[in-house]
Amino acid sequence: MAVQELTQETFESTVTGNDIVIVDFWAPWCAPCRAFAPTFEAESEQHDDVTFAKVNTEDQQALAAAFQIRSIPTLMIFREQVIIFSQPGMLSAGQLQDVIAKVKALDMAQVHEDIRKQQESAGGGA
């Protein structure tokens, strides 16, 4: 599957319309970002069930600010619209494969239950 370029206009629909979305926040001037790009692209070809996307932080500054991107590259993974991984810095091919395997193995019913409990305790219950 080809890597998608996300914009402020397409970001939400991409995250809400796909089970797993892996977003690479990058910039053209960033050497580590350019070095990571082939790894990200190659991994996208291995997972038809995962949406791989990139956000150019130069062109999409408001989007980068909304997610408080302070360092690039930053990899952010959404599953069922929940941010379950966010880490600045390059990953090796093996590290990226490991993270994807762990994301796929997550018990999302438990994740949603944990979020519900946290929200109840923070807000006094609903």
Image: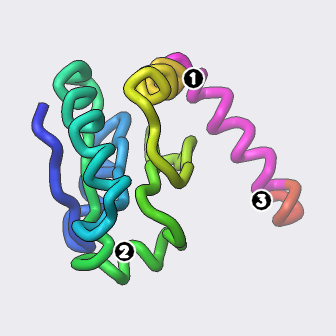
Q: How far is the residue under mark 3 from the one under mark 2? A: 30 Å
**In front of the other: label 1 or label 3?**
1
Horizontal side of residue 126 vs 32, given as left or right: right
Q: How far is the residue under mark 1 from the one under mark 2? A: 27 Å
Residue 11 percent location from the top left of the image: 28, 62
Q: Is residue 102 above or below residue 44?
A: above
Classify mark 1: residues with Cα within 10 Å, few (<14), some (14-19) or many (20+). Answer: few
Which type of secondary structure does the marked residue at label 1 adopt? loop
On residue 63, the disc is 2
Q: Which residues are magenta?
A: 105-120
Residue 63 percent location from the top left of the image: 37, 74
Per the image, the residue denoted by label 3 is 126
Q: Is residue 109 above or below residue 81?
A: above
Q: How far is the residue under mark 1 from the one under mark 3? A: 26 Å
Which type of secondary structure does the marked residue at label 3 adopt? loop
Give the amino acid type for the residue marked by disc 2 in the picture: Leu
Asked whether residue 17 is in view, the answer is no
Per the image, the residue denoted by label 1 is 106
User: Residue at position x 54%, y 21% from top?
Assistant: 102
Locate the N terminus and report the quarter of the image it occupies.
Answer: top left
Residue 66 percent location from the top left of the image: 47, 76
For marks 3 and 2 on the same chain, the one whose residue lies earlier in the sequence: 2
On residue 119, the disc is none
User: Residue at position x 35%, y 52% from top?
Assistant: 24
For marks 1 and 3 on the same chain, the one whose residue lies earlier in the sequence: 1
Residue 15 percent location from the top left of the image: 33, 51
Answer with the quarter of the image where residue 21 lies: top left
Locate the C terminus and report the quarter of the image it occupies.
Answer: bottom right
